[in-house]
Amino acid sequence: MTQESSEDLDFRLAMKRIVFRAESARAAKLEAEADILGERVATEKENRKLRFGIAIAALILMALQVLAANGIFAWYGVAAGWAVLSSAVTAWMGTTVIEVVSVVLVVVNYLFPGERRKYA
């Protein structure tokens, strides 16, 4: 059996230390990335809670506004003996539809930012 020189042993030990440090650095990097991803998940959960509340409030406000517009139109119709001009009916229906569609688009774009870019 040959005796290994102390230089060979020192070299092997140094290589093992280098490999150990590299693996430790890699593990620390993975832990940091996992922590960052965990924080992103927690932030996204909080954002979803906030978005849900905002979406419900926007829908309630939209419903109240549509009910108010319908009530005002009904009041106008009763006051005029239901002799309402066709242009007034067209304007009322058009603005109601446009309002509903625009509010839905705003809420969807807020709730799902960047989703359109993913699939476009």
Image: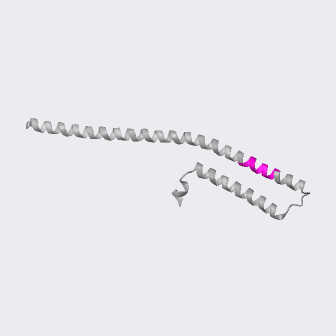
Residue 81: give x, y in percent of width and height.
92, 57
Residue at image location 43% in from the left, 40% down from the top: 36
Q: How is the image coloured?
A: one colour
Left or right of 117, for residue 29 = left
State the image coordinates of residue 5 (x, y, percent, origin top left): 8, 37
Q: How many marks?
A: 0
Near-viewer residue (64 or 23): 64
Q: Residue at x 63, y 54 (%)?
A: 105
Mainly helix, strand or loop, the magenta region? helix
- Is 38 situated left or right of 103 in this image? left
Position of 17 with respect to 87 (left or right) is left
Q: Position of residue 53 (x, y in %)?
A: 64, 41
- Confirm whether the magenta stretch covers residue 25: no
Residue in the foreground of this view, choosing between 66 and 10: 66
Quarter-of-image position of residue 84: bottom right
Q: Which residues are magenta?
A: 62-71
Residue at 63% from the left image edge and 52% from the top image edge: 106
Image coordinates for residue 25, horizontal then vertical, percent: 30, 39
Q: Quadrant of residue 76?
A: bottom right
At a point 39% along the width and 39% down the height, the residue shown is 32
Q: Quadrant of the N terminus?
A: top left
Horizontal side of 81 relative to 48 (left or right) equals right
Which residue is more in the foreground, 77 or 23?
77
